[in-house]
Amino acid sequence: MNFVAWTIVACEIGFWVVILLGLVTRYLFKRERLGFFFLALTPIIDLLLLVVTATDLYNGATATQAHAIAAVYLGVSIAFGKSMIRWADERFQYYIQQQGTKPARKTGWAHARHSMKGSLQHLLAFIIGATLLVVMIYLINDPSRTEALSGTLKVWALVLGIDFVISASYFIWPRPDKTK
């Protein structure tokens, strides 16, 4: 595994570590401002990944799947970051703090709407990540060095399409409520 791939792994681990530190600091140590500081570090992690990837490509590296995944990671992190933090926050409050209401499993139309919202966030992630991929392809301007980037862009577009089909299917066949 190359340096960029290890940086992606480190950034993903760092993302969840700072979220956990933020939640622990906020709820267990009652230090809200310090907890917010840790949660606010997540965009810094994204910026670090962007700098490492851009520097590697600028120095003449041939784009690999790791470079492409860095763009995907950045798009997903930006588009889903706030909702992932909210998801972790709700579960931390309920399961660790024993406060609030138990996060409910969505069913029916609520699940369909939630799924479509996720697909729209996926679209935003795709727009951000695809823009980064296209910019890298344009700046490198050598198809032999950017095959991995263009291949990832095609596969991601297919995955996005499948995501929308699945979300739309929940409006036709809503998820049943198994508690009834």
Image (cartoon, grey):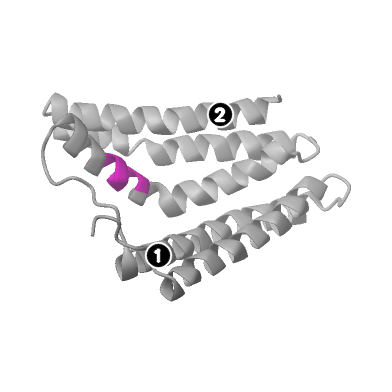
Q: Secondary structure at mark 1?
A: helix
User: Please, which residue is most extreme toward the right here?
Assistant: 144
Judge depth for marks 1 and 2 and give the one in front: 1
- Residue 88 located within the stretch drawn in magenta: yes
Q: CA distance from mark 1 to mark 2?
A: 27 Å
Residue 52, located in which quarter of the rendered image? top right
- Residue 10 located within the stretch drawn in magenta: no
**Residue 167 versus residue 66 in the image, above or below:** below
> At 50% across and 40% down in the image, what residue appears?
47
> At 78% across and 46% down in the image, what residue appears?
148
Horizontal arrangement in the rendering, residue 151 relative to residue 53 (left or right): right
- Residue under label 2, please give it: 9
Q: Main secondary structure of the magenta part?
A: helix
The one nearer the camera, 180 or 110, is: 180
At which x and y percent is residue 165? 55, 68
Q: Secondary structure at mark 2?
A: helix
At which x and y percent is residue 149? 74, 49
Horizontal arrangement in the rendering, residue 94 relative to residue 57 (left or right): left
Q: Residues within 10 Å of mark 2 (few under 14, many from 20)?
A: few
Horizontal arrangement in the rendering, residue 142 relative to residue 39 (left or right): right
At which x and y percent is residue 141? 82, 53
At which x and y percent is residue 27? 15, 31
Horizontal arrangement in the rendering, residue 170 relative to residue 53 (left or right): left
**Residue 169 versus residue 93 in the image, above or below:** below
Q: How many marks?
A: 2
> At 75% across and 39% down in the image, what residue appears?
64
Which numbered tag is attached to residue 117? 1
Specify the amino acid type for callout 2. Val
Question: Start and end of the magenta stretch?
Answer: 84-89
